[in-house]
Image (cartoon, grey):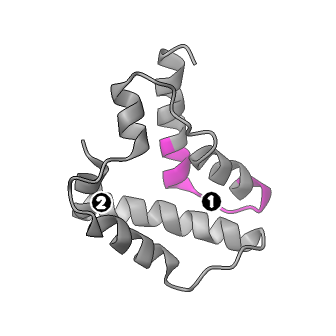
Amino acid sequence: MPFGEIVSSTAGGQLVGDMISESVKVGRRVGARFEEDTAQRSVAFLDSYGPQLRSSMVRDIERRWRLQVDSLNGHVVNQAAWVSVDVPPNRMLWTLVSLHNQRLGA
């Protein structure tokens, strides 16, 4: 499924927004500066590409390549633990995609 279809759906857009909001919160806790509306603007930016938007993870899945989830959501999860921030959507995605990687023998 193209990432744009996920972002443009109500539930998918909410989930993506939650993951970005969590990432921003973690970033702020470790000293990064973000505008107040960073998460909302990020989701709007992704949604502006429409349903044809395809993430690199989707392309990697199609090629049966290992996904770089440890460097993305895994980093958010690890930093969140360090600064005591709960990040359930990021943790869920990291866990599920890590299982995908294990099936590939990664």
Taking the spot 28% from the left edge, 70% from the top edge, the residue there is 48
Q: Outermost residue, bottom direction? A: 36
Left or right of 86 in this view: 81: right
Q: Is residue 20 above or below residue 88?
A: below
Left or right of 80 in this view: 43: left
The residue under label 2 is 7
Taking the spot 31% from the left edge, 47% from the top edge, the residue there is 54
The residue under label 1 is 86
Neighbourhood count class around disc 2 (C-alpha, 10 Å): few under 14, some 14–19, many 20 upward: many
Q: For the stretch drawn in magenta, what is the main secondary structure?
A: helix
Which amino acid lies under the numbered mark 1 shown in the image of this protein? Asp
Q: Quadrant of residue 34?
A: bottom right
Name the spot of residue 65 as percent of width and height, x first.
46, 24
Q: Is residue 64 above or below residue 91?
A: above
Taking the spot 49% from the left edge, 83% from the top edge, the residue there is 37
In the foreground, 41 or 103: 41
Which amino acid lies under the numbered mark 2 shown in the image of this protein? Val
Q: In which quadrant of the rendered image does the C terminus lie?
A: top right
Neighbourhood count class around disc 1 (C-alpha, 10 Å): few under 14, some 14–19, many 20 upward: some
Residue span colored magenta: 81-93
Q: Earlier in the sequence, mark 1 or mark 2?
A: 2
Q: In which quadrant of the rendered image does the N terminus lie?
A: top left
